[in-house]
Amino acid sequence: MFFIGAHLSSAKGYLNMGKDALKIGANTFQFFTRNPRGFKSKPLNEEDLAGLSRLMQEEHFSPVVAHAPYTLNPCSTRPEVCELALQIFREDLKIMEYLPGNYYNFHPGSHLKQGPKEAAAKIADMLNQVLSPDQHTIVLLETMAGKGTEVGRTFEELAMILEQVELSEKMGVCFDSCHLSDAGYDVREHLDQVLSEFDQVIGLNRLKAFHLNDSLNPLGSHKDRHALIGEGFLGLSALTNMINHPLLDGLPFILETPTDMEGHKKEIELLKKHYHESEAHENGSDNQ
């Protein structure tokens, strides 16, 4: 089945996000747990969360993706920044328990010239403090474009983190098509090879969600600038190949393109026209 959605605002509440998703033809979505450029979160509303959970079951949504704030950096050189990341993670994972069976995605952070190895150890240490055996949320590491000292520009860097996490069954990976291309992975011309490499380094069973974005910049640019679907370097043909690839069948595809609700609705309609359900299902899936 094709699960497609977009990043939505939580300003009017959780249940409202689910209703907004339906308005744009989506059966999944992503949202920020708190201010994406800060740390403030809204008061917990259990009734609102329960309402969204019921709606998702009734409408047969795929798992949705909660996104941590961009400012979170668990591998900072400053202990107080690492401690704040730990605090935010704990708070957000408690909130996510009211929406069991979904995902919590985060950018691994920036190593600030410590190097990826030292950063991976710090990130894994935080995860080992916050993950619990009885939690119902899978935490996702996002593939990054590699600007500055970002951690996660290569599959090997993500693997360094995952290998040090004790409750590895609570961990997964979120692909971002723009980030992958900007990092140097040729998902436009050689998607099969990229997926094969990921499978060898990490394992396709770890791939849980997919940010579907075109890129304003060419392969290996390390810029991280999203473009509208079909209007960037990747193009509609490459993005169509992604949503129809048998190894990606069943994943929630999330649009983070620079547009509004109406724009996302049009992109979702466009992608649905290019999704070949029978082909994807005939080839099976490694993600079910």
Image (tube, grey):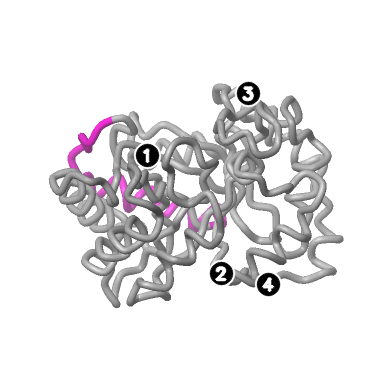
Residue 263 got which mark? 3
Helix, strand or loop at label 1? It is strand
> Residue 219 in the image: x percent, y percent?
70, 38
Q: Rounded to the nearest whole Å, what is the CA distance between mark 2 and mark 4? A: 14 Å
Residue type at mark 4: give it: Asp
Say which label, 3 or 4, has the lower sequence index: 3
Helix, strand or loop at label 4? It is loop
Q: Eyeballing the image, is 123 above or below 214?
A: below
Disc 2 target residue: 202
Cβ atoms at labels 3 and 4 below 8 Å apart: no
Q: Is 204 positioned to the left or the right of 88 in the image?
A: right
Q: Is 276 positioned to the left or the right of 75 in the image?
A: right
Say which label, 2 or 3, has the lower sequence index: 2
Residue type at mark 3: give it: Gly
Disc 4 target residue: 286
Which residue range is magenta in the image? Answer: 38-62
**Does 230 appear in magenta?**
no
Residue type at mark 1: give it: Phe
Q: Rounded to the nearest whole Å, what is the CA distance between mark 1 and mark 4? A: 28 Å
**Does 54 appear in magenta?**
yes
Helix, strand or loop at label 2? It is loop
- Of the 4 image quadrants, the one containing the C terminus is bottom right
> Residue 272 in the image: x percent, y percent?
76, 42
In this rendering, the label closer to the viewer, 1 or 3: 1
Cβ atoms at labels 1 and 3 below 8 Å apart: no
Q: Residue at x 30, y 37 (%)?
A: 71
> Residue 79 in the image: x percent, y percent?
15, 49
